[in-house]
Amino acid sequence: KSGFVSIIGRPNVGKSTLLNHVMGQKIAIMSDKAQTTRNKIQGIYTTETEQIVFIDTPGIHKPHNALGDYMVESAYSTLREVDTVLFMVPADETRGKGDNMIIERLKQANVPVILVVNKIDKVHPDRLLAQIDDFRTQMDFKEVIPISALEGNNTDKLLDILKGNL
Ligand code: GDP
Ligand code: MG
């Protein structure tokens, strides 16, 4: 069984960190500097019976130039190419204009979206629950999963969900 999954979200939410954690190696550059991921990067996760192609994408922001525009469109282009989208948001920052912009595009795309709330190691559980409730008012998610890509918390559960959807 196999499938394609893309990881979408604002810059710095931890998309590349998740790809690297899943792959168990440093495939994508992780940085607290925005826009380190300038192109789509693929990692292929394989078991005896399953294969999931993860696509790490440039952070979606309001583009100010041609490169920015290219990066954002390359992230959005994955919406037409994958079976499932992981929409990643950070637990420690409230929903902003950038997220709303992404949500509008996700609603237009005809693809199941899993909300991945990352960096749970940084917040109190109450704050995490409020964050999840808030995003749920904006659109329907196939699943919602809180993780820490850095520490690997709950990433196995995320993989199980993705395997279950193959
Ligand atoms: P991207 O721009 O979405 O690809 O984000 P990166 O993967 O490059 O990560 C941006 C920054 O957030 C880096 O400094 C990471 O170490 C940090 N980061 C990523 N995931 C987590 C997490 O789960 N917890 C914490 N505390 N930091 C994280
Ligand atoms: Mg990145």
Image: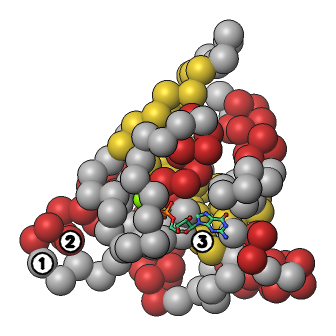
Q: Residue 78 — which label? A: none
Asked if residue 89 lies left or right of residue 131, the reply is left
Residue in view at x 49 percent, y 82 percent: 100
Q: Residue 98 or 92: which is nearer the viewer? A: 92
Q: Could you give the CA–CA distance between mark 2 and mark 1, rounded to whole angstroms?
A: 5 Å
Residue 118 in the image: state x and y as whole percent.
67, 66
* Residue 106 seen in the current view: no
Image color mode: secondary structure
The residue under label 1 is: 65
The vertical placement of 129 against 58, above or below, is below
Q: Could you give the CA–CA distance between mark 1 and mark 3, rounded to whole angstroms?
A: 24 Å
Please, what secondary structure does the residue beneath circle 3 have? strand
Q: Quadrant of ligand 2?
A: bottom left
Q: Earlier in the sequence, mark 1 or mark 3?
A: 1
Amino acid type at circle 2 is Gly
The residue under label 3 is: 89
